[in-house]
Amino acid sequence: MTEPLTPRARQIVAVARELLEQEGPAALTMRRLGERLGIRAPSLYKHLPDKAALEAAIIATGFEDAAAAFEDAVDGAADPLAAFTVAYRAFALAHPHLYRLMTDQPLPREHLPAGVEDRAAAPLQRAAGDPALARAVFAFAHGMVLLELTRRLPPGGDPEAAWQEGIAAFQARTRTAERSDLR
């Protein structure tokens, strides 16, 4: 795991995330980031060793924000599984470039702060109550989000209806499991 970032490194990461969110991944270069900060690109390496470290730090901020959104959605929800999927979709659609950075490549776990990934996963684990179901819900939500972000749904396809069908299937699975637990 990584050491905590200095205040200046946190500032650099925040500006880099803004750049990513506003202009997309192609704009996320050390040169472009240096321009945005008003410094020369080589000066960035005093605070972050390389672009991979910068991306890992941005991913960590994404996990922190996602975790907070998922916790808020799930905690106290009448239907935590549905609440999680709604929050997951909302986060991804509100932050498409960040979401893709977080999910389109192998996750640099060795460069993330300890516990940040687990915190983001915990609300889904609680909502699902079963690790296999949690992975299935994650796979469904991730796949649906990617279909929306890449505009790969068929013309006239209703993503909302597909989301509702998927959630209903998972809800039926949890109701069946709850009934068998009562026996």
Image (spheres, helix red, strand yellow):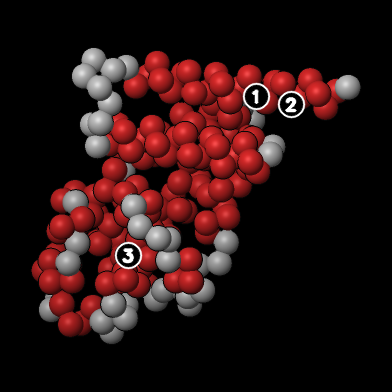
Element under label 2? helix
Disc sitting over residue 177 in the figure: 2
- Residue displayed at 53% across by 35% down: 137
Residues at marks 1 and 2 touching, judged by CB atoms closer than 8 Å: yes
State which tag comes first along the sequence, 1 or 3. 3
The residue identified by callout 3 is 55
- Residue displayed at 23% across by 15% down: 156
Q: Residues within 10 Å of mark 3 (few under 14, many from 20)?
A: many
Disc sitting over residue 173 in the figure: 1
Element under label 3? helix
Q: Nearer the viewer, residue 151 or 46?
A: 151
Given the image, on which type of amino acid does mark 1 rest? Arg
* Left or right of 41, for residue 112: right
State which tag comes first along the sequence, 2 or 3. 3
Disc sitting over residue 4 in the figure: none
Can you say which quadrant of the picture contains the C terminus?
Answer: top right
* Left or right of 45, for residue 29: left
Report the Cα–Cα distance between label 1 and label 3.
Answer: 37 Å
Element under label 1? helix
